[in-house]
Image (cartoon, grey):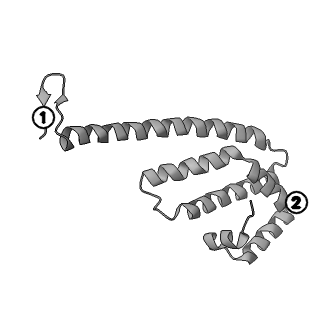
Amino acid sequence: MKINLEEIWKTLGWPVGLTVVFAAILGLFGVSLDTVLAIAGSMIGAQLLISLLIDVLKWAGVVNDGTAGKWSAVLNLVGIVGIAVALGLYPNFDFPALDASLVVIAQFASLIFGFIVQLAGTKRVHQFMVRGLGITAFSGSTQLRYA
């Protein structure tokens, strides 16, 4: 897969010079941009959490159609900066252990989000069947009909 940096910068609204400044600042702290990007690219748990967060925010109406790419770019940039800071402050930081934890968190959060979506969907289907189709609804004490 070929990475188009020009498109990424355009999505971020980030000038090329800012990347050079970012790489230079990392160099001052003895951190290689290549190392940061290699770690960021291998952090599957972080990628899962970012994707899930964007999906949850879309479902909640916070992220509008067509803007998910910008959200993803910004959240991934925050992750890259976090990795760079961690490498600068704690060069022996255990990123694989962190990523393994993030994978478990993302799996659990996906399960919870799926459950919430399922509950909301079930309620809407019930409302459609009762009100839209005129099917009898039952309660503990009475029989209701919306038609």
The quarter holding residue 37 reads: bottom right
Residue 137 or residue 88, whichever sits in front:
137
Quarter of the figure that contains the N terminus: bottom right
Residue at image coords 75%, 63%: 2
Residue placed under numbered mark 1 in the picture? 145
Q: Residue furthest right?
A: 30
Task: Give the residue drawn at x 11%, y 41%.
Answer: 147
Q: Is residue 27 above or below residue 50?
A: below
Does residue 96 sit above or below 76 in this rendering?
A: above
The residue sitting at the top extreme is 141
Position of residue 7 measured from the top left corner of the image (x, y, whole percent):
66, 71
Q: Residues within 10 Å of mark 2 (few under 14, many from 20)?
A: few
Task: Name the residue carrying label 2.
Answer: 30
Q: Residue 98 is drawn in which quadrant?
A: top right
| CA neighbours of label 1 inside 10 A, class few (<14), some (14 to 19), many (20+) | few
Q: Picture coordinates of residue 119 (x, y %)?
A: 37, 36
Depth check: 35 or 10 in front?
Answer: 10
Determine the CA span between mark 2 and mark 1. Answer: 72 Å
**Count of numbered circles in the view:** 2
